[in-house]
Image: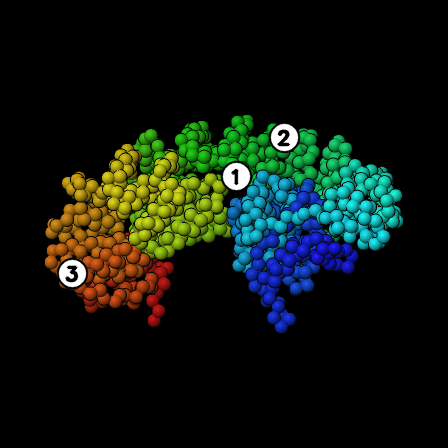
Amino acid sequence: MADGLRQSIGKHRTLLERDRELRALDSALSDLCDPVDGVVRARRGGLLALAGSAGLGKTTLMVEARARAKALGCTVLSGKGGEKEQELAFRVVRQLVQPTLATMGETERRDLLGSWYDVVATALGLEAEDTGRMPDPIGVRDGLDWVMTRLAVAEAPVVLLLDDMHWADVESLSWLASFAPRAEDLPLLIVVAYRPDELPPEAAAFHTLAERHGTRPYNLAPLTAAGVTRIVRDELGEGAEDQFCDECWTVTGGSPFEAVELAARLGERHVRGEKDDLPVMRDLASAVKGAGLIERLHRLGPATVRFAWAAAVLGTSISPELAATIAVIGTEEAAEAIERLRAARFLADGSGPQGGLQFVHPLIATAVYRSIPSSLRVGMHNAAAEAIRATGLQPTIAARHLLEVPCENNHEAVECLRQAAREYLRAGAPEAARRVLTRALQEPPLPQERAALFYELGCSTFLIEPAATVNHLRSALAEPGVDADLRASIVYRLTQALAHTDRMAEASSVAANEAQQATNPRIRLRMQADQFVWSACRADEPDSPARSRTLARLAERLTGRGLEERYILGLRAWDAMVRGESKRTALGCAEQALRGGLSWSDENRGFEVPVSVAMVFMYCDQPRLAEELFTRGVAECEQRGWRGSHLALGHTLFGYIRYRRGCLAEAEELAQEGLRIADKVEGAVPAQWFAIGILIQTLLARGRTDDARRLADIYHYGETVPNAVIYPDPRTVYAELLLSEGRRSEAASLLSGVGDWLDSRAWRNPAWCPWQLNLASAVALTEPERAVSLAQDAVKRARDFGAASAIGQALHTQAEVTGGPEALDLHAEAVGYLECSPASYELARALVSHGAALCRNGQLQEAADQLYRGLEGAVHCGAEALANRAREELTAAGLRPLPLRDAQTDTLTAHERKAAEMVSQGHPIAVAAKELSITEQAMKRLLSSAYRKIGTDATGLARALKTFPRPLP
């Protein structure tokens, strides 16, 4: 016998010809556990994949893995796919986690799950407190990552055993594919077994994981003739003849399952293993699988057959009571049937925490299920659904059986399927919800329920197939007599789905038509708000000024009494800002919109308006308030389990606020996180556009042009123009990249097109899109007069808007393109305005430019002060290229760069706090300076530092100081 032909798996049987796999298992366990002086210390884990067709011993290897892991002191968690239970979302995940959760008290469970409790509760089979919460799939996966990480650390070292993963539910497979790479950094080993040829198309990510993660999967081979001979002789004795054993190998094909079953049957018949026993052996071999197996089952009697059929219908973890009910046999008959099926090696005791029964091998379960006459099988599934509902089990379990039953116009079935869909949506499993709702429509439902059912179906497909959502919701609207509030919810979701499929014009048109038809004033106002949202998002809106006029007239009559009015006022605030109207107008509407609250997670409202209101404060030089609104809004989305596009955009725009404040390192980190999340979400293209543009701007500000170019090339940024309005405007951002690369003419051409587009919409605010400033820079060398004219117009527009940062940035560009001594006053004015704003990076740029201009005009003392201040600002912002320019200018002027004078901190000094408080109370700067015994210039610098640290201009200073931390004594 070859070395390694047999390896012990326990006292009952030996494991043959699996040396390679066992060595891999031992190696993985060794990496996971490091015994020192008898104490197991967790190290690092990973993934071990076992692949092979049915009957090759994958489950036996998993049993051995459990034994060896237990022997090393590991915590073992296990799960197993089921052929008839693939529709049950997160079933395998529940098998992994529920046994551990069952040993905990309620307090301990909540401590383990933490803030993720309501997000993952339904997915784990727990009762969520907030039953209205519908987390997205990414949110649930992130929550499950948290739970498994906590378990891995708390119970280290941990081994996950996942068998028959070709039959696992898609949701569990998706989670595993995303989580498994983390195992390398945790005291966690994941062992998976599956049939590669039977993986469903939805398991592509899992297949990629198993094929490419570390070593390739260990593909199990059939036993050799020597291996089958060993099995036969272990059962019949060493006297079994070679010819007999070889024939056993031939008829079993080297399948360990078939060889073991055949040997057991031969032993029961007391076959000696001689040549004359070959006919008997072949007869017994035919009864191990297929028709012979079913014939053997029928010999056990009708009641036993019915019980076996019922067990096959139930799948895995078979409840004897439910099986008896479905088989329509009494308790005593059921007990007798169980004993017969155990003796005949059809059934065995279940290994899971729920106990019960299970088939000895999946091949037996499959054969028994397929042997049930089709009409009877349907009836048994129907009986199973009724029995499950009667026992109070989860509707998802009953729904699994209803999917196998023909439509019967059964209202109770419809209600069960709808309940199951709601549970699936609470579990973050929209695909499972779609399956059961589609079946509910086919039942069919009562006429008065059809619209609501179409709406629920449309909501279930929104994240996975928005185009299908459009069709379902149009069908819902076509139903007669739809309730007004339901109709409004249908219309909103329809417009949202149209927008997500890049059909902005249709979205706006649907809302406009609905607003005209609505008789309820509140609903009409809501529809108008939706129309304004999607019209403003259209890059090709035909008459933007007309919409703005209509919106302004409507907003004038509103006071913000209800949510609908607040949404209109929020839209008016945004429109006033992009049009470049007075910031007082924009802030006034934004303040009114916020007074009654704007939720970021209202499923029937969306978060476009709340986000826009928050961004208005940023553009109006109150970024601290914008950050507070984003912090609360992102937390609200996270609590709901919304961690897809919502979270991607939240992180990204928060990064944009930090960029505008000059916190470039944080801005880069936030934008990268937003892009990372957006990349994970199917169809999250708008979120990607936002993140890429902001990240490119941040990289350019930090002087990393090559990194910005690589990012643009990876995502083909600049090659296409999105149909939706994105900010910062993608073409303007790409032109900035071209300018930094010295490609001025290309940038100028692009920016001219942006200007034509924005002017046609009457969007004139350079704070929102500085296309004129960039175009002025692009043509300054070739068309200096045009450059000055562009900059002057931008300055006028910025003054009309009134934000100090916008005015200062525009004056800075005007000074740059003007040049010469006459530009010095413009530089000084730019610095003065930016000192009154929270824009740290723009102030640093203006200071360095002013200092350089002073140097060129021989005013070295004044130049040194501005350059030193600009250098400090650039370093604090993380703008490496700007800091280098400042050092070069100092060196060229014969000045030595000094150490930084101010420590980098966001904390106000006592003097800064006092100065800010006096100004916020209405004291003129001269009076406040006298009170503090400092010059007016020193007072202005104290205030400038306070504005930048707090994140506001003078307008928002009083409110910001109420919550800003006081300096330590």
Q: Are marks 1 and 3 in contact (CB under 8 Å)?
A: no
Give the camera-side residue of 266 and 110. Answer: 266
Please give the label number shown on residue 310: none
Whole-percent x, y for residue 538 in the image: 37, 35
What amino acid is found at the position of numbered circle 1 in the picture?
Ile
Label 2 crowding class (10 Å Cα cut-off): few <14, some 14-19, many 20+? some
Q: Nearer the viewer, mark 1 or mark 3?
A: 3
Tell me which numbered mark, 1 or 3, is placed earlier along the sequence. 1
Disc 1 on helix, strand or loop? loop
Whole-percent x, y for residue 782 in the image: 17, 40
> Which residue is labeled 2 in the image?
442
> Which residue is labeled 3 in the image?
893
Whole-angstrom CA distance, mark 1 to mark 3, is 61 Å
At x 73%, y 40%, the residue is 366
> Which residue is labeled 1 in the image?
464
Tell me which numbered mark, 2 or 3, is placed earlier along the sequence. 2
Quadrant of the snapshot with the N terminus? bottom right
647 relative position to 447: left or right: left
Give the camera-side residue of 683 and 741. Answer: 741
